[in-house]
Image: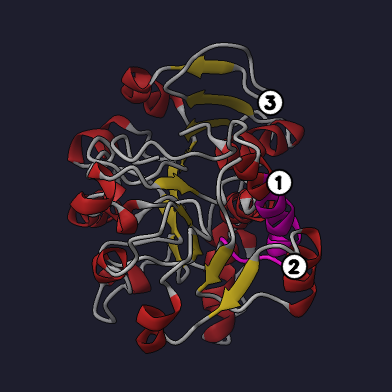
Amino acid sequence: MAELNKIVLTIDLDPSYLERLRTTYPQIDVVVCTDQDRLPEILPGAQMLLGRLTPEMFRQSPDLRWLYTTGAGVDRYLFPELVESDLLLTNNSGVHAPHMAEYLVGMMLAFARGLPFLMRAQMRHEWTQRRAFPVYELGRQKLAVIGLGDIGQALAWRAKALGMQVSGTRRHVGDSLPGVDRLAPPEALHELIAEADHVAITLPLTDETRGLFGTTEFRLMKPTAFVYNIGRGPIIQSDALIAALRNGEIAGAGLDVTDPEPLPSDSPLWDMESVLVTAHTSGGGPFYWERGIELLVENIRRYINDEPMLNVVDKRAGY
Protein backbone atom coordinates (compact mmCIF):
# COMPACT_ATOMS: atom_id res chain seq x y z
CA MET A 1 0.00 0.00 0.00
CA ALA A 2 1.19 3.50 -0.86
CA GLU A 3 1.81 5.78 2.10
CA LEU A 4 -0.71 8.58 2.46
CA ASN A 5 -1.12 9.96 5.97
CA LYS A 6 -1.32 13.72 5.34
CA ILE A 7 -3.15 15.78 2.72
CA VAL A 8 -2.95 19.57 2.45
CA LEU A 9 -5.76 21.52 0.77
CA THR A 10 -5.04 25.07 -0.37
CA ILE A 11 -8.71 25.76 -1.12
CA ASP A 12 -11.78 26.13 1.07
CA LEU A 13 -14.04 23.15 0.59
CA ASP A 14 -17.58 23.10 1.88
CA PRO A 15 -17.61 21.55 5.39
CA SER A 16 -19.81 18.70 4.18
CA TYR A 17 -17.19 17.69 1.60
CA LEU A 18 -14.41 17.88 4.16
CA GLU A 19 -16.48 15.70 6.46
CA ARG A 20 -16.98 13.20 3.62
CA LEU A 21 -13.22 13.05 3.12
CA ARG A 22 -12.34 12.77 6.78
CA THR A 23 -15.04 10.23 7.54
CA THR A 24 -14.01 8.04 4.63
CA TYR A 25 -10.32 8.20 5.54
CA PRO A 26 -10.04 8.83 9.29
CA GLN A 27 -6.42 7.63 9.22
CA ILE A 28 -5.41 10.58 7.01
CA ASP A 29 -4.69 14.01 8.46
CA VAL A 30 -6.57 16.44 6.20
CA VAL A 31 -5.22 19.97 6.66
CA VAL A 32 -6.73 23.09 5.08
CA CYS A 33 -4.38 26.03 4.59
CA THR A 34 -5.41 28.90 2.32
CA ASP A 35 -2.68 31.23 3.63
CA GLN A 36 0.25 31.01 1.24
CA ASP A 37 2.62 32.40 3.86
CA ARG A 38 1.88 29.52 6.22
CA LEU A 39 2.31 26.74 3.67
CA PRO A 40 6.05 26.22 4.27
CA GLU A 41 5.28 25.17 7.85
CA ILE A 42 2.24 23.09 6.85
CA LEU A 43 3.61 21.13 3.87
CA PRO A 44 6.31 19.02 5.57
CA GLY A 45 5.07 15.45 5.96
CA ALA A 46 2.30 15.85 3.37
CA GLN A 47 2.32 13.30 0.56
CA MET A 48 -0.52 14.98 -1.34
CA LEU A 49 -1.47 18.56 -2.13
CA LEU A 50 -4.90 19.54 -3.42
CA GLY A 51 -4.67 22.97 -5.01
CA ARG A 52 -1.99 25.14 -6.52
CA LEU A 53 1.70 24.29 -6.41
CA THR A 54 4.38 26.87 -7.19
CA PRO A 55 8.05 26.09 -7.91
CA GLU A 56 8.99 27.49 -4.50
CA MET A 57 6.40 25.32 -2.75
CA PHE A 58 7.62 22.31 -4.70
CA ARG A 59 11.16 22.86 -3.46
CA GLN A 60 9.86 23.15 0.11
CA SER A 61 7.91 19.86 -0.06
CA PRO A 62 10.35 16.92 -0.06
CA ASP A 63 7.63 14.48 1.06
CA LEU A 64 5.15 15.42 -1.68
CA ARG A 65 4.26 12.56 -4.01
CA TRP A 66 0.95 13.64 -5.55
CA LEU A 67 -0.45 16.94 -6.82
CA TYR A 68 -4.22 17.06 -7.35
CA THR A 69 -5.33 20.13 -9.32
CA THR A 70 -8.82 21.53 -8.82
CA GLY A 71 -9.41 22.22 -12.51
CA ALA A 72 -8.73 20.48 -15.81
CA GLY A 73 -6.03 22.70 -17.31
CA VAL A 74 -2.56 22.08 -15.89
CA ASP A 75 -0.40 24.39 -18.02
CA ARG A 76 0.31 26.71 -15.07
CA TYR A 77 1.78 23.82 -13.06
CA LEU A 78 4.15 22.42 -15.65
CA PHE A 79 7.35 24.12 -14.57
CA PRO A 80 10.54 22.19 -15.47
CA GLU A 81 11.28 20.81 -12.00
CA LEU A 82 7.82 19.28 -11.72
CA VAL A 83 7.83 17.84 -15.23
CA GLU A 84 11.18 16.15 -14.62
CA SER A 85 10.14 14.79 -11.21
CA ASP A 86 8.32 11.58 -10.29
CA LEU A 87 5.43 13.58 -8.81
CA LEU A 88 2.05 12.16 -9.76
CA LEU A 89 -0.22 14.79 -11.31
CA THR A 90 -3.98 14.34 -11.56
CA ASN A 91 -6.76 16.79 -12.35
CA ASN A 92 -10.50 17.30 -12.00
CA SER A 93 -11.24 16.74 -15.67
CA GLY A 94 -14.85 15.76 -16.30
CA VAL A 95 -16.24 17.33 -13.14
CA HIS A 96 -17.04 20.59 -14.93
CA ALA A 97 -18.01 19.06 -18.29
CA PRO A 98 -21.82 19.37 -17.93
CA HIS A 99 -21.96 23.07 -17.14
CA MET A 100 -19.19 24.00 -19.61
CA ALA A 101 -21.06 22.11 -22.34
CA GLU A 102 -24.28 23.91 -21.41
CA TYR A 103 -22.38 27.19 -21.49
CA LEU A 104 -21.31 26.50 -25.08
CA VAL A 105 -24.83 25.53 -26.08
CA GLY A 106 -26.02 28.78 -24.50
CA MET A 107 -23.50 30.75 -26.56
CA MET A 108 -24.64 29.06 -29.77
CA LEU A 109 -28.32 29.64 -28.96
CA ALA A 110 -27.60 33.29 -28.15
CA PHE A 111 -26.10 33.88 -31.57
CA ALA A 112 -28.83 31.85 -33.28
CA ARG A 113 -31.52 34.14 -31.89
CA GLY A 114 -29.54 37.37 -32.13
CA LEU A 115 -29.34 37.90 -28.37
CA PRO A 116 -26.04 39.84 -28.43
CA PHE A 117 -27.61 42.35 -30.82
CA LEU A 118 -30.86 42.51 -28.86
CA MET A 119 -29.15 42.98 -25.52
CA ARG A 120 -27.04 45.84 -26.86
CA ALA A 121 -30.21 47.38 -28.28
CA GLN A 122 -31.84 47.05 -24.85
CA MET A 123 -28.93 48.92 -23.26
CA ARG A 124 -29.50 51.71 -25.80
CA HIS A 125 -33.27 51.61 -25.15
CA GLU A 126 -33.87 50.78 -28.82
CA TRP A 127 -36.78 48.69 -30.10
CA THR A 128 -34.84 46.56 -32.59
CA GLN A 129 -36.87 44.20 -34.72
CA ARG A 130 -35.86 40.88 -36.14
CA ARG A 131 -34.90 42.11 -39.62
CA ALA A 132 -32.03 44.11 -38.14
CA PHE A 133 -29.94 41.02 -37.38
CA PRO A 134 -29.60 37.47 -38.74
CA VAL A 135 -31.33 34.54 -37.04
CA TYR A 136 -31.19 30.85 -37.74
CA GLU A 137 -31.94 27.44 -36.26
CA LEU A 138 -29.18 25.30 -34.81
CA GLY A 139 -30.86 22.19 -36.21
CA ARG A 140 -29.08 20.99 -39.37
CA GLN A 141 -26.12 23.27 -38.77
CA LYS A 142 -22.65 21.80 -38.48
CA LEU A 143 -20.61 21.90 -35.29
CA ALA A 144 -16.90 21.07 -35.19
CA VAL A 145 -15.68 20.24 -31.68
CA ILE A 146 -11.92 20.72 -31.59
CA GLY A 147 -10.86 18.46 -28.75
CA LEU A 148 -13.28 15.67 -27.88
CA GLY A 149 -12.30 15.23 -24.26
CA ASP A 150 -14.80 15.25 -21.41
CA ILE A 151 -16.13 18.73 -22.23
CA GLY A 152 -16.17 18.14 -25.97
CA GLN A 153 -18.06 14.88 -25.59
CA ALA A 154 -20.58 16.46 -23.23
CA LEU A 155 -21.14 19.18 -25.83
CA ALA A 156 -21.41 16.75 -28.73
CA TRP A 157 -24.43 14.81 -27.56
CA ARG A 158 -26.21 17.98 -26.38
CA ALA A 159 -25.66 19.53 -29.80
CA LYS A 160 -26.85 16.36 -31.48
CA ALA A 161 -30.06 16.55 -29.44
CA LEU A 162 -30.64 19.97 -30.99
CA GLY A 163 -30.39 18.43 -34.44
CA MET A 164 -26.86 19.55 -35.27
CA GLN A 165 -24.38 17.58 -37.37
CA VAL A 166 -21.37 17.05 -35.15
CA SER A 167 -17.79 16.36 -36.11
CA GLY A 168 -14.74 16.57 -33.90
CA THR A 169 -11.05 15.91 -33.43
CA ARG A 170 -9.41 13.53 -31.03
CA ARG A 171 -5.85 12.32 -30.81
CA HIS A 172 -6.92 8.70 -30.33
CA VAL A 173 -9.53 7.87 -32.96
CA GLY A 174 -11.09 4.59 -31.94
CA ASP A 175 -14.63 3.70 -30.99
CA SER A 176 -17.49 6.00 -31.91
CA LEU A 177 -18.62 8.65 -29.41
CA PRO A 178 -22.24 9.50 -28.53
CA GLY A 179 -23.48 12.39 -30.65
CA VAL A 180 -20.45 12.50 -32.93
CA ASP A 181 -21.16 11.90 -36.61
CA ARG A 182 -17.54 12.14 -37.70
CA LEU A 183 -14.49 11.53 -35.54
CA ALA A 184 -11.18 12.70 -36.99
CA PRO A 185 -7.54 13.12 -35.92
CA PRO A 186 -6.11 16.58 -35.16
CA GLU A 187 -4.57 16.67 -38.65
CA ALA A 188 -8.10 17.05 -40.08
CA LEU A 189 -8.59 20.41 -38.33
CA HIS A 190 -8.62 22.51 -41.50
CA GLU A 191 -11.08 20.23 -43.26
CA LEU A 192 -13.51 20.22 -40.33
CA ILE A 193 -13.49 23.96 -39.66
CA ALA A 194 -13.98 24.75 -43.36
CA GLU A 195 -17.27 22.83 -43.29
CA ALA A 196 -18.54 24.00 -39.89
CA ASP A 197 -21.08 26.66 -38.95
CA HIS A 198 -19.81 26.59 -35.36
CA VAL A 199 -16.31 25.74 -34.13
CA ALA A 200 -15.94 24.99 -30.41
CA ILE A 201 -12.41 24.90 -29.01
CA THR A 202 -12.25 22.62 -25.98
CA LEU A 203 -8.52 21.90 -25.99
CA PRO A 204 -5.90 22.16 -23.25
CA LEU A 205 -3.02 24.59 -23.73
CA THR A 206 0.11 22.74 -24.86
CA ASP A 207 3.04 23.50 -27.13
CA GLU A 208 1.03 21.97 -29.97
CA THR A 209 -2.17 23.97 -29.36
CA ARG A 210 -0.66 27.37 -28.55
CA GLY A 211 -1.58 29.69 -31.43
CA LEU A 212 -3.42 26.89 -33.23
CA PHE A 213 -6.06 29.29 -34.56
CA GLY A 214 -4.60 32.13 -36.58
CA THR A 215 -5.07 33.92 -39.89
CA THR A 216 -5.02 30.74 -41.97
CA GLU A 217 -7.66 29.01 -39.87
CA PHE A 218 -10.06 31.96 -39.81
CA ARG A 219 -9.79 32.40 -43.57
CA LEU A 220 -10.69 28.75 -44.00
CA MET A 221 -13.88 29.16 -41.99
CA LYS A 222 -17.19 30.24 -43.52
CA PRO A 223 -17.96 33.97 -43.29
CA THR A 224 -21.18 32.92 -41.53
CA ALA A 225 -19.39 30.73 -38.97
CA PHE A 226 -18.83 31.36 -35.26
CA VAL A 227 -15.88 30.31 -33.12
CA TYR A 228 -16.04 29.59 -29.38
CA ASN A 229 -13.15 29.17 -26.95
CA ILE A 230 -13.46 27.74 -23.45
CA GLY A 231 -10.05 26.03 -23.51
CA ARG A 232 -7.24 28.53 -22.98
CA GLY A 233 -6.87 32.02 -24.44
CA PRO A 234 -3.50 31.54 -26.19
CA ILE A 235 -4.93 28.79 -28.40
CA ILE A 236 -6.36 31.66 -30.48
CA GLN A 237 -4.04 34.33 -31.86
CA SER A 238 -5.89 37.45 -30.66
CA ASP A 239 -4.75 39.80 -33.41
CA ALA A 240 -5.77 37.30 -36.06
CA LEU A 241 -9.20 36.88 -34.46
CA ILE A 242 -9.80 40.63 -34.30
CA ALA A 243 -8.75 41.00 -37.93
CA ALA A 244 -11.00 38.13 -39.02
CA LEU A 245 -13.99 39.69 -37.26
CA ARG A 246 -13.31 43.14 -38.68
CA ASN A 247 -12.83 41.77 -42.19
CA GLY A 248 -15.99 39.65 -42.08
CA GLU A 249 -14.04 36.43 -42.47
CA ILE A 250 -16.09 34.92 -39.63
CA ALA A 251 -19.45 35.98 -38.21
CA GLY A 252 -18.68 36.10 -34.51
CA ALA A 253 -16.98 34.69 -31.45
CA GLY A 254 -17.91 33.49 -27.98
CA LEU A 255 -14.93 33.79 -25.65
CA ASP A 256 -14.72 32.65 -22.05
CA VAL A 257 -10.92 32.75 -22.22
CA THR A 258 -8.73 35.36 -23.87
CA ASP A 259 -5.11 36.25 -24.48
CA PRO A 260 -4.10 38.15 -22.46
CA GLU A 261 -6.32 37.45 -19.50
CA PRO A 262 -7.94 39.45 -18.03
CA LEU A 263 -8.87 41.03 -21.35
CA PRO A 264 -7.59 44.63 -21.37
CA SER A 265 -10.31 47.27 -21.12
CA ASP A 266 -9.19 48.81 -24.42
CA SER A 267 -9.48 45.57 -26.41
CA PRO A 268 -11.79 46.02 -29.42
CA LEU A 269 -13.35 42.64 -28.62
CA TRP A 270 -15.42 44.25 -25.85
CA ASP A 271 -17.32 46.48 -28.27
CA MET A 272 -17.86 44.16 -31.22
CA GLU A 273 -21.54 43.39 -31.59
CA SER A 274 -20.84 39.87 -32.82
CA VAL A 275 -18.65 38.94 -29.84
CA LEU A 276 -19.61 37.59 -26.43
CA VAL A 277 -16.91 37.89 -23.76
CA THR A 278 -17.07 36.35 -20.30
CA ALA A 279 -14.38 36.33 -17.63
CA HIS A 280 -13.37 32.66 -17.51
CA THR A 281 -16.62 31.77 -15.78
CA SER A 282 -17.78 28.71 -17.73
CA GLY A 283 -16.12 26.31 -15.30
CA GLY A 284 -18.26 27.25 -12.32
CA GLY A 285 -21.38 25.36 -11.33
CA PRO A 286 -23.46 24.30 -8.33
CA PHE A 287 -22.49 20.61 -8.53
CA TYR A 288 -18.77 20.99 -9.20
CA TRP A 289 -17.53 19.65 -5.88
CA GLU A 290 -20.53 17.37 -5.45
CA ARG A 291 -19.02 15.43 -8.34
CA GLY A 292 -15.45 16.40 -7.51
CA ILE A 293 -15.47 14.98 -3.99
CA GLU A 294 -16.50 11.57 -5.28
CA LEU A 295 -13.64 11.62 -7.78
CA LEU A 296 -11.24 12.65 -5.03
CA VAL A 297 -12.43 9.95 -2.63
CA GLU A 298 -12.13 7.29 -5.32
CA ASN A 299 -8.67 8.39 -6.41
CA ILE A 300 -7.39 8.33 -2.83
CA ARG A 301 -8.70 4.78 -2.51
CA ARG A 302 -6.88 3.81 -5.70
CA TYR A 303 -3.68 5.52 -4.60
CA ILE A 304 -3.65 3.77 -1.22
CA ASN A 305 -4.27 0.40 -2.88
CA ASP A 306 -1.78 0.89 -5.73
CA GLU A 307 -4.55 0.67 -8.32
CA PRO A 308 -4.65 2.54 -11.66
CA MET A 309 -5.50 6.20 -11.02
CA LEU A 310 -8.15 8.31 -12.71
CA ASN A 311 -7.33 11.54 -14.57
CA VAL A 312 -3.57 11.06 -14.58
CA VAL A 313 -1.91 13.88 -16.53
CA ASP A 314 0.95 13.23 -18.91
CA LYS A 315 3.26 16.01 -17.73
CA ARG A 316 5.20 16.12 -20.97
CA ALA A 317 2.13 16.11 -23.22
CA GLY A 318 0.41 18.69 -21.00
CA TYR A 319 -2.93 16.93 -20.55
Is 43 above or below relative to 176? Answer: below
Circle nearer the viewer, 1 or 2: 2
The verdict on residue 286 being magenta is: yes
**Secondary structure beneath disc 2?**
helix
**Circle 1 SS class:** helix
Mark 3 or 2: the one toward you: 2
Q: Kindly report which numbered mark, 3 or 1, lies closer to the viewer in this rendering.
A: 1
Q: Residue at x 64, y 49 (%)?
A: 300
Q: Which mark is residue 268?
A: none
Label located before the other in sequence (3 or 1): 3
Q: Amino acid at mark 2?
A: Arg
Amino acid type shown at disc 3: Gly
Q: Residues within 10 Å of mark 3 (few under 14, many from 20)?
A: many
Q: Quadrant of residue 7?
A: bottom right
Q: On the rendered structure, is 199 left or right of 20? A: left
Q: CA distance from mark 3 to mark 2?
A: 39 Å
The image quadrant that residue 187 belongs to is top left
Question: Which percent across, then down, holds residue 15?
Answer: 75, 79
Relative to 65, 311 lies left or right: right
Q: Which label is found at residue 298? A: 1
Vertical relation: 223 (above or below) 49: above
Question: Which residue is at the front of the view, 205 or 310?
Answer: 310
Between discs 3 and 2, the one toward the N terminus: 2
Residue 22, disc: 2
Residue sitting at 41 percent across and 58 percent down?
64
Q: Give the mark nearer the N terminus: 1 vs 2.
A: 2
**Contact (CB < 8 A) between labels 1 and 2?**
no
**Residue 247 visible, this orientation:** no
Q: Main secondary structure of the magenta part?
A: helix
Magenta-colored span: 283-298
- Where in the figure is residue 241, as x and y percent of width and height? 26, 52
